Structures are given as structure tokens and as C-alpha cells.
Image: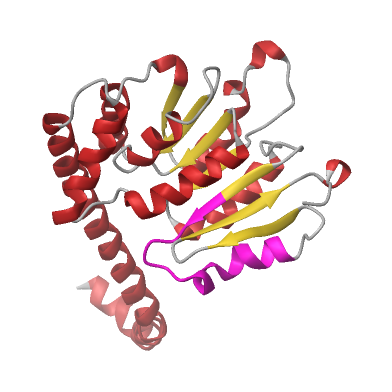
């Protein structure tokens, strides 16, 4: 009873606040629901893809693993980048010839396998995946393809948590200041700019040159307005190397070491 008495004078204020913020609250609830549905669909999709590839491919044969991925994607929805993006990725890797690669967003492990098969014997891939289940299944696919733990590292965390720790994985015993030669961003596009800024801040982009690949599956290039604005605002460090229907390559080089490309 006393609660009702106290609440009556506050009723106009409560109504005003609820009216003012209901749109924001509704939008927040909508985003949360959409995220939950994407997560659920993603887990189901990755489980199905993993089960198919694991059972149908020839274990220890990297080409068989990739072919089985592509076979699955021909008739089922899949989060793997697929052969079209995969071939474009291969072209970049062959041109850049990286020895240290960072992958943000592991999905089914498809792109991880494509990257690893083109790295030099001493090359190393670090892949970051937020979802523990997806990270475990992706890691198993990498091992099924025949790669060893000495060639890659899977970090199960958000990219924001992982990036400040990455320096310790870059050959600390050699005392090198070099960072990553290639970064593949295939996670949440809203995190592309914050993560690029974090990589700059932690000095994890190789000062002598680093190619950063931005995958936009359902997004258009114009949806990457924020990160493109940052890149174009720093012409002494960045340039856009190529723009495809599904992938953009940007090149970073520290100003003091920059040469014309």
C-alpha cells in the first residue's frame, strides 16, 4: 500500500521516461535478440559443417579438407568464406608471403586451413575466436588437415581481450620488433575499426608492411564507412590496395619505412 502512495507522485515522471526511452530499449532488445539468433544459427551451422568435413574428408590431406568444405557449401548454408573469397585470399598470401598471420574470426576453420597451407615452414598463424565451441571445432579441423600445434595458436576470447596479449606470441625469444605481416578480419564488422586501432596502439602491425584484409559477407563496402574514414585520414600509413565484391585489402606501413608501391 505504501508503495502505491509513494509511486503516485512519480507517475508522470515514470511515464515520461518510459516514453522517451522505449524506442531505445526496444532497439536494444531487438539487437540482443538478433545477436542471440545469429549465435544460435552460427553454432548450428558450424556443428553441421564440422561433422560433414570431419566424416567425409581424407584426414591429413589439406586439399581434401578444403574440397570437402566446398562440397558442403554447394548445398548447405555455411560460414566458411568459400572458394571465391578463398582464391582471392590465396592470391594475397602468395604475394605478401607472410610469416606471421593474425586471423580475427575463425568460424569453421576453413580460412585458417587455407592460410596455413601457404605459410613458410617457420610461419605461424594466430587465430582469435570468441565462441569456445566454434574455437574447439575449428581447431580440430586444422589438426585434421595435418597441421601441428607448433604452426598455429587458437585464442578463445574477444578480439579486444586478445590483442593486448599478442606480442607474447610473436617469437619473443628472437627479440624481434616485427609484428604481423597479414591480418584477416572476418568477425563482427563493427569491431574492425576498434581492433585496427588496438593493433596500431600495441604496435602489432609490421612497420615494414602489413596487409589487412576486411571481409564483408553481407555488408557492402560503404558499410565500412568508419574504418575507411580512418584509413583515408592517414595516407602516410595506409592505402587501399584492392577492392573486391566481398573483400578489401588495405596496406599499412610505418611512415619512416614507407616506400612507393
Report if residue 230 lies within the magenta region: yes
Residue, x 30% and y 22% (percent of image)?
A: 143
Residue, x 18% and y 25% (percent of image)?
A: 58
Q: Measuring from the top left, give residue 14's x and y in whole percent.
A: 36, 81
Q: Measuring from the top left, give residue 250's x and y in whole percent.
A: 63, 54
Q: Is residue 198 visible?
A: yes
Q: Measuring from the top left, give residue 238's x and y in whole percent.
A: 73, 55
* Residue 94, above or below 196: above
Q: Is residue 186 visible?
A: no
Depth check: 193 or 149 in front? Answer: 149
Depth check: 232 or 120 in front? Answer: 120
Residue extending farthest top = 173
Q: Measuring from the top left, give residue 202's x and y in whole percent.
A: 68, 37
Depth check: 244 or 21 in front? Answer: 244
* Residue 21, above or below 235: below
Residue extending farthest right = 256
Image quadrant of residue 138?
Answer: top left
Report if residue 243 lies within the magenta region: no
Q: Position of 29 compared to 184: left or right?
A: left
Image quadrant of residue 106?
Answer: top left
Magenta segment main secondary structure: helix
Q: Position of 129 compared to 118: left or right?
A: left
Query: Which colour scheme appears in the figure?
Result: secondary structure
> What is the number of callouts on the image?
0
Residue, x 57% and y 22% (percent of image)?
A: 169
Residue, x 55% and y 17% (percent of image)?
A: 122
Q: Which residues are magenta?
A: 213-232
State the quadrant of the N terminus: bottom left
Q: Position of 131 compared to 200: left or right?
A: left
Amino acid at each position: 500500500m505504501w508503495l502505491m502512495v509513494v509511486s503516485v507522485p512519480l507517475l508522470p515522471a515514470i511515464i515520461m521516461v518510459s516514453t522517451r526511452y522505449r524506442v531505445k530499449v526496444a532497439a536494444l532488445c531487438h539487437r540482443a535478440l538478433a545477436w542471440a539468433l545469429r549465435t544460435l544459427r552460427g553454432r548450428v551451422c558450424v556443428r553441421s559443417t564440422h561433422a560433414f568435413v570431419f566424416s567425409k574428408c581424407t584426414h591429413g590431406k589439406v586439399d581434401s579438407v578444403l574440397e570437402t568444405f566446398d562440397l558442403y557449401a554447394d548445398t548447405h548454408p555455411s560460414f566458411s568464406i568459400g572458394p571465391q573469397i578463398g582464391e582471392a585470399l590465396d592470391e594475397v598470401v602468395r604475394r605478401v608471403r607472410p610469416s606471421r598471420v593474425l586471423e580475427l574470426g575463425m568460424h569453421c576453420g576453413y580460412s585458417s586451413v587455407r592460410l596455413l597451407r601457404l605459410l613458410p615452414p617457420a610461419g605461424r598463424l594466430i587465430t582469435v575466436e570468441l565462441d569456445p565451441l566454434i574455437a574447439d571445432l575449428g581447431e580440430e579441423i586444422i589438426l585434421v588437415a595435418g597441421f601441428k600445434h607448433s604452426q598455429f595458436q587458437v585464442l578463445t576470447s574477444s578480439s579486444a581481450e586478445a590483442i593486448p596479449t599478442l606480442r607474447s606470441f610473436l617469437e619473443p625469444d628472437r627479440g624481434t620488433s616485427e609484428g604481423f605481416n597479414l591480418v584477416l578480419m572476418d568477425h563482427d564488422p563493427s569491431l574492425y575499426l576498434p581492433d585496427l586501432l588496438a593493433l596500431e596502439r600495441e604496435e602489432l602491425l609490421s612497420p615494414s608492411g602489413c596487409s589487412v584484409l576486411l571481409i564483408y559477407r553481407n555488408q557492402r563496402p560503404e558499410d565500412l564507412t568508419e574504418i575507411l574514414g580512418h584509413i583515408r585520414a592517414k595516407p602516410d600509413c595506409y592505402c587501399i590496395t584492392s577492392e573486391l565484391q566481398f573483400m578489401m585489402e588495405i596496406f599499412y606501413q610505418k611512415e619512416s619505412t614507407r616506400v612507393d608501391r
